Amino acid sequence: MFSKFRLLIVVIVIHCMLVSPIWADNVINVKQNAIELLAKADEYRNFKGKSFTFDLKLNSMETGKDDQIFTLKVEILNSHTSLVIYSEPISERGKVLLMAQKNLWFYAPSSHKPIRITPQQRLLGEASNGDVASTDFSGDYDPHYVDTEVVDSVTCHVLELTAKANSLATYEKLKLWVRADDFKPYKADFFGVSGKLLKTAYFRRYEKLPNLGEKEQLTSIQIINPLTEGKQTLMEYSNFNVTEIPVSRFNPNTLNRL
Amino acid sequence: MKVVSQILLMLFLNLMPIALPAFELGKINVRGQVELPWQYTPERANTFFNPNGVIINNQQHSSLPALRFTPKFSQGSVALQGDFWLQSLITSTKTEETFFFQKSTFNWNINDQFTVSGGIDLQHWGSGYIWNPSNPFQDREINFVDRVISYKRNGNFFASLDWSGRNGWSTSLYFVNHRPREKLYGINVEHQNAFALKLNKQFDNSDVSLTYALLEDTNFIGGSYSASIGNQLELHGEFSLRDKRRSVLPRSIVANGQDSFFILQANKHIDWRAQFLIGGQYTTNNQINMIFEYLYNGEAYSEKEYDHLVQGSNQSRLQLDGLFAAPSAGFLGESNSLLGSMKRHYLFFRVADGQLIDKLEGRAFVRFGIQDSSVITGGLLSYPIKNGLNLMLGGQYYGKMAGSETAAIPFQFVLYSGLTLLF
């Protein structure tokens, strides 16, 4: 009996030595460095400060209504400067949305002139401009480590993100669940200024990019609107390409030449 | 020429059942648009400048089918773009085709920050919605808002060099062979060579620009500013100063020692004139967008000048059966062409709702003349029948407040409807 108990103790100790210290270490580290944890999560959404492009299919769905599908070409110069070029639907084709800091410019071929728009204006169905153009939580939000939590049987670190002053942050506050094993974003709740839950996002799919050294990249996000049942947006990313993009493409005066 | 109109109509009817994709001609991507509008404009009889309707030959019903092609070719750092319209005016008495060469440009990104462009294009800038006084090449009619028919015109020959910095600064240097199209400058305006240098700076949530232009012998200084205030409010402003006024003014021609008839003549004296616009836009939580603007046009007519114009029209009316019938009719005809935005102070308001009822988009505006209580108000409803195919219905009403500029417009209102197909 005693030897069985001793054996159990040994097993527990060995287990603790092998697993728990790493786990405990992780917890201590991430608690101490939420910024680092967020940066690791961001690595699945961008390319560490390099400019890149991708295609985005955005499908807004609502019960009883036709799907609203946009296909977009997105160019990211840096975490604060991006360009969204509309390909479909036909009615939107040729339109361009430029985001530079908190400046939002919209160009439509029919007007021949870029106009400044307010961040409130939604030009992409149910998705906000920031949902599309922002690929970097770190640049727009200050993180705070909350706890670990098991969501859908997945162990996650929970971060609370607060919008930085003068950032392009679309939301006042975010709650972000990051997988404990590989730091992939798993889920996020987006809150407005009043504290009301506006959206919940599930980061559904990650794919290895053969053209970019098998880097694992987030390729599918499902955004659910908690305010209206059956209302959701599916964002599907493809054709990632890390490339030098001329800064002249991000000039409001030259949008009509894109 | 009716053949062209019939081809346009047949083409449109053929396109209707399907949503066409853009097509490729070799490496050239071609997009386009078909418009099939109809408009009804009942005349307003016996205005200052159109006595008994004898000056303006109004066609109450007209149709303006049009076909647009916008080809684009890109290869590396070079892009070629075009934008061409073929429009047919069909009335009960005539059919007339017009080709608009809006754009035919090349753009070459020399390197990361420099772009060279040239060809034919429209030069547009400024933060205002209804008018852009900071743009020395402005060509838009002030009240051309929310119509079924696209605003079409020919572009200007130009060459430009743009520099874009990584710190929010940018500069543009332009040469433009420009023909002003503002009504106030009359109908006999010629092309002029112009140079412009524009400096821009973008801040975190605002931007400012400053322009100097030399338009033949006229110096022009313009500036604009816009800023986002929070998530829902945007504020903007523009100004310009030019050292010559270009507006045509009435002048009496004396024959036989007495005033005999009037003409409109350009005023080219050194005469500093200011123009400015201030405004903003607000977007509600329900995505309703509102724009409000006040504009001041220092080149426009003062009350005294407008009274002089009316006086000229009174005299010209008396001459219509006399010795100077032809120049008098010409004076009245040209006076009609000036109408629309010839006073100095205006207020403008526009509201747009992209989902007025389900997919139905609605827009409405009103422009109020502070000096004479003139009113132009209008609206447009647009319904997407299918992807790229829209049915539109709209109109504009010209207020008839006694003595106001809009009461002199020789039409009571315009009603229009139409189909637009993008491909």
Image (tube, rainbow, N blue to C red):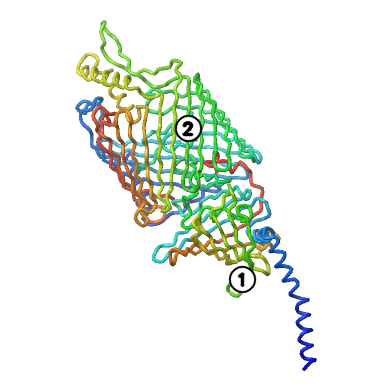
Q: Position of residue A228 (x, y in %)?
A: 43, 64
- For the C terminus of chain A, give its image quadrant: top right
Looking at the picture, tell me which residue is in the foreground, A187 or A243. Answer: A187
In this picture, residue A196 sits left or right of residue B76? left
Q: Amino acid at mark 1?
A: Glu
Q: Chain of mark 1?
A: A
Q: Which mark is residue A149?
A: 1
**Can you identify the residue that label 2 sits on?**
B238
Q: Which mark is residue A79?
A: none
Q: Amino acid at mark 2?
A: Glu
Residue sitting at x 36%, y 55%: B385
Task: Answer above or below: position of A98 versus B310.
Answer: below
Q: Quadrant of residue B58?
A: top left
Dot 1, crowdedness within 10 Å: few (<14), some or many (≥20)? some
Q: Do the residues under discs 1 and 2 have CB atoms within 8 angstroms?
A: no
Numbered disc total:
2
Task: Answer above or below: position of A244 versus B301.
Answer: below
Q: Position of residue A45 (x, y in %)?
A: 63, 59
Looking at the picture, tell me which residue is in the foreground, B406 or B23. Answer: B406
Query: For the residue labelled by badge 2, is the local secondary structure a helix, a strand or a loop?
Result: strand
Q: Nearer the viewer, mark 1 or mark 2?
A: 1
Q: Is residue B7 visible?
A: no
Q: Position of residue B140 (x, y in %)?
A: 41, 34
Q: Residue furthest front?
A: A2
In this picture, residue A23 sits left or right of residue B154? right
Looking at the picture, tell me which residue is in the foreground, B365 or B151. Answer: B365
Q: Is residue B62 visible?
A: yes
